[in-house]
Amino acid sequence: LRHQAINLKLPMTPDGYVPVELLLQHQPPRLQCVASISEIEDVVRTNDKQRFKLAEKFASDFREPVTVASLEEPIRCIRANQGHSIKGIIDPEALLQLLSPEDVASIPTIVHGTYSEAWESIQTEGLRQMKRTHIHFAEGLPGEDGVISGMRKSCDVYIFVDASRCATAGIPFLRSDNGVLLTSGVDNTGVLPPTYFSHVTDRSGMI
């Protein structure tokens, strides 16, 4: 849903949905243990990071032909809420909520989780989107109230972002349905330079 939909020749809407029926027909390796729509519904409902969302779409919502239903019939679909590397198909503003500069400036915590071995390059080169379409952040640390996604629990370096400075510079931020904050960086370059960091701590909170 995040990386291989196009390679599997699955039709996708601009906001990231693919038909569940076609997904099950393709049976990619990670889905070989899933046999039914009800099992997919259970995964969506119980996923601790709320990574997925189900919705009904119509054939007209897809850019390419969809053969699972007529133009008038709803199509049961699923998407990943964030974390895509697919480019050219997904419209970030259809998939995610674009935040205004005022919204960004008002966020108390914007933090990116990483690892000590990556920090050496990050402190000079900044954060990069790498193979994804955005850099990912959480609105708090793992385990804090309301924080369900945005970084791996194993991260041992936390990079806190200066929200006001980002807002003043017009750096775009978006929010996913499961509460992850995302940015394409300065001028949509995929890079957020260290000048936009407020402080960095280890897991114990030491700066």
Image (cartoon, rainbow, N blue to C red):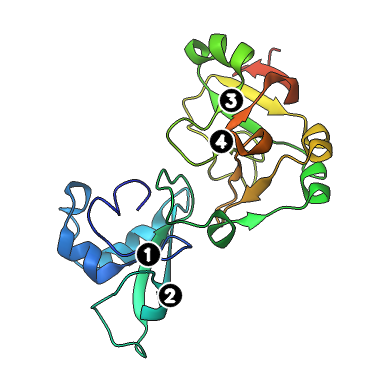
Q: Is residue 132 above or below residue 36?
A: above
- Answer with left or right where residue 150 lies relative to residue 172: left
Q: CA distance from mark 3 to mark 1?
A: 30 Å
In this view, which residue lies farthest toward the top?
120
Q: Label 4 is placed on what type of residue?
A: Ile
Identify the mark nearer the N-term, 1 or 2: 2
Q: Are marks 4 and 3 in contact (CB under 8 Å)?
A: yes
In the displayed structure, 162 sits above or below 73; it is above
Residue sitting at x 42%, y 56%: 89
Could you tell me which secondary element the residue under label 2 belongs to? helix
Residue under numbered circle 1: 78
Q: Residue at x 24, y 58 (%)?
A: 9
Mark 4 and mark 2: Cα distance apart in space: 27 Å
Mark 3 lies on a secondary structure that is strand
Left or right, 41 with respect to 181, comes to left
Q: Position of residue 183 (x, y in %)?
A: 62, 40
User: Could you tell me which quadrant the C terminus lies in?
Assistant: top right
Question: Residue 127's mark?
Answer: 3
Q: CA distance from mark 3 to mark 2?
A: 34 Å
- Residue name at image x 57 percent, y 35 percent: 142
Disc marking residue 135: 4
